[in-house]
Image (cartoon, rainbow, N blue to C red):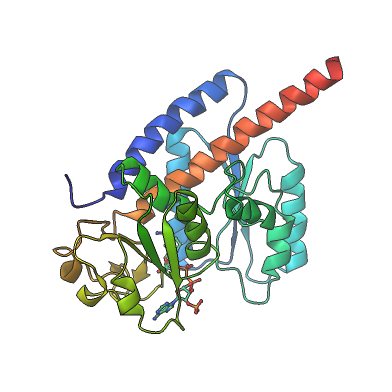
Amino acid sequence: MDKILSGKVVSLNLIGKLKKKILKLKCEGVIPAAAFIRIGSHRDDMAYQNSILRTCNDVGVTTVLHELSDHTTSEELIELITKLNEDETIHGIMIFRPLPEEMDEEMINNTISPDKDVEGMNPINQAKVFAGNYQGFAPCTAAAVMEILKYYNISLKGKHAVILGRSMVVGKPLSMMLLKEDETVTLCHSKTEHIDEMARTADVLVAAMGRPNAVGADYIKPGAIVIDVGINVDQSGKIHGDVNFDEVVDLASRITPVPGGVGSVTTAILIKNIVKAARNFKCNKESAIACLLI
Ligand code: NAP
């Protein structure tokens, strides 16, 4: 049994399956396509953006990039999203975040059509995740964690998961997804007292705080499965997880590395969601035609 849970292996496996689905959709006349919106030109965004666009192009997903200036208003962004919602050649919409502080993020998330919300940011999709309904779109990073656990056949039923971090993109949706798999879940945050003691009760410990190397040996129950979601870039450009890997690796039974862990799977999940949106579009179109024929 491999101790290292390789996100690269999981991603390659998923991408392989997606390529077949994309080919099938293309034979049926649908070319999966997504619009990407970037506001301003932060260096981190650009690297992430280029990697996503490259992967989309490699697998056969068409991409349309909208590069907006730093001075874009919420109203202008909403106007663009509304146009993309109506565009039948676009199946998914992704916005690079964080958005400028002055933007009305709630209104922007509400504007993205739930059918094209491949990042799982619209409240309708969030509600579905919380209701245990997987017909919508779950946030890609939370879904990436689940994909890794599924790929490595890690049994979750009855186990105790402790998640460090309660954001709407990782901690909260992941807590609901683990709960649906019959785990018992504890969600911790910056105000949690004795967080190390809490973490030591975990069979599955997920670190998603954005605090480089914060999780040391004192957070780990021997034999625990450790999933590191953190991506923290230091001044020299080196990436660190939230887990101090060297300190924890001997205690954990299985552990994701950073880089090469959860982050590697997140882009594959985004593509999975775009393909799902394209397939849903095709099915909806066919049922609309069927209705007209009745
Ligand atoms: P976020 O929105 O800033 O949320 C961080 C969460 O961690 C908050 O709930 C915060 O608590 C909690 N927290 C912060 N410091 C803490 C501490 N010392 N002890 C306990 N809890 C603490 O961050 P995010 O967007 O969820 O991202 C978290 C990390 O995951 C970042 O490193 C980010 O880069 C990474 N990430 C990775 C991927 C990927 O694909 N692998 C994708 C997205 C994010 P409060 O709620 O009390 O403030």
Report the side of 220 relative to 81 (left or right): left
Q: Residue at x 49, y 24 (%)?
A: 23
Q: Quadrant of the N terminus?
A: top left
The image position of residue 142, as x and y in percent, is: 46, 55
The image position of residue 18, as x and y in percent, is: 45, 32
Residue 24 seen anywhere in this rendered image of the structure: yes
The image position of residue 241, as x and y in percent, is: 31, 67
Residue 49 seen anywhere in this rendered image of the structure: no
Viewer-proximal residue among 195 and 165 = 195
Q: Quadrant of the C terminus?
A: top right
Q: Residue furthest left?
A: 250
Q: Residue furthest top?
A: 293
Viewer-proximal residue among 185 and 28 = 185
**Up-down: is 29 above or below 118?**
above
The image position of residue 3, as x and y in percent, is: 18, 52
Report the side of 92 relative to 201 (left or right): right
Viewer-proximal residue among 251 and 41 = 251
Looking at the rendered structure, the number of numbered marks drawn on it comes to: 0
Q: Residue at x 49, y 27 (%)?
A: 21
Q: Quadrant of residue 239?
A: bottom left
Q: Residue furthest front?
A: 158
**Up-down: is 176 above or below 55?**
below
**Up-down: is 269 above or below 207?**
above
Q: Quadrant of residue 67?
A: bottom right
Q: Residue at x 65, y 55 (%)?
A: 127
**Up-down: is 204 above or below 218?**
above
